[in-house]
Image: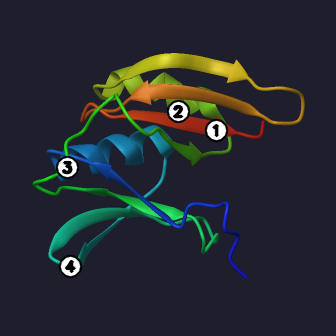
Amino acid sequence: MLNPNVPAWFEIPTHDLDRAQSFYEKMLGIELARENFGGNDMAVFRGAGKPNSSGALVRMPDCEPSVQGSVVYISIDDIRPALDKVKAHAGDVFVPCTALPPGMGYFAQIRDCEGNRVGLWSPN
């Protein structure tokens, strides 16, 4: 059964898909899968066994990277190592690792190499 409160899919716009894929793979220590859906090249995050939550980096002519608007949060095991890699790969840290109320984990926000504001969330 699907959880109606969990986003089913997200897309992070890019100008240079290769550069963006390299940024996220190095920052998060993961591999993204290159796929083509509906004529659009994408680098897909594999929801780590969570079928209702995944997304992709995508290059589409009518979508522009931006630090304004919606913020997508990516769930990771530990924010600190990822934040250490952001600046080395042409990104910036907007909000450092910040504790949420007890039991809710930690979050941070970055600007990726394409100019998107993206959130990171960790339970630890």
Please name the residue that numbered disc 1 is placed on. 121
Q: Judging from the image, what secondary structure is the residue with disc 1 in? A: strand
Quadrant occupied by the C terminus: top right
| Disc 4/disc 1 C-alpha distance (Å) | 30 Å
Task: Give residue 3's position: percent from left, percent from top.
Answer: 70, 70
From this view, report whether residue 40 is shown above or below residue 27.
Answer: below
Whichever of callouts 3 and 1 sits on the residue coming sooner in the sequence is 3
- Point out the frontmost of discs 1 and 2: 1
Label disc, if present, on residue 29 of the rendered structure: none
Whichever of callouts 4 and 2 sits on the residue coming sooner in the sequence is 4
Q: Is residue 18 left or right of residue 30?
A: left
Q: Are marks 1 and 2 in contact (CB under 8 Å)?
A: no
Task: Give residue 14's position: percent from left, percent from top.
Answer: 22, 46
For this orientation, the residue located farthest to the bottom is 1
- Mark 3 Cα within 10 Å, few/some/many (few <14, many 20+)? few
Please name the residue that numbered disc 4 is placed on. 38
Q: Are marks 4 and 2 in contact (CB under 8 Å)?
A: no
| Residue at 52 percent of width and 33 percent of height | 82
Q: Amino acid at mark 3?
A: Cys
Please name the residue that numbered disc 2 is placed on. 82
| Disc 4/disc 3 C-alpha distance (Å) | 15 Å
Task: Give residue 98's position: percent from left, percent from top.
Answer: 68, 20
Please name the residue that numbered disc 3 is placed on. 63
Q: Is residue 75 left or right of residue 62?
A: right
Whichever of callouts 1 and 2 sits on the residue coming sooner in the sequence is 2
| Disc 3/disc 2 C-alpha distance (Å) | 26 Å
Q: Amino acid at mark 1?
A: Trp
Q: Judging from the image, what secondary structure is the residue with disc 2 in? A: helix
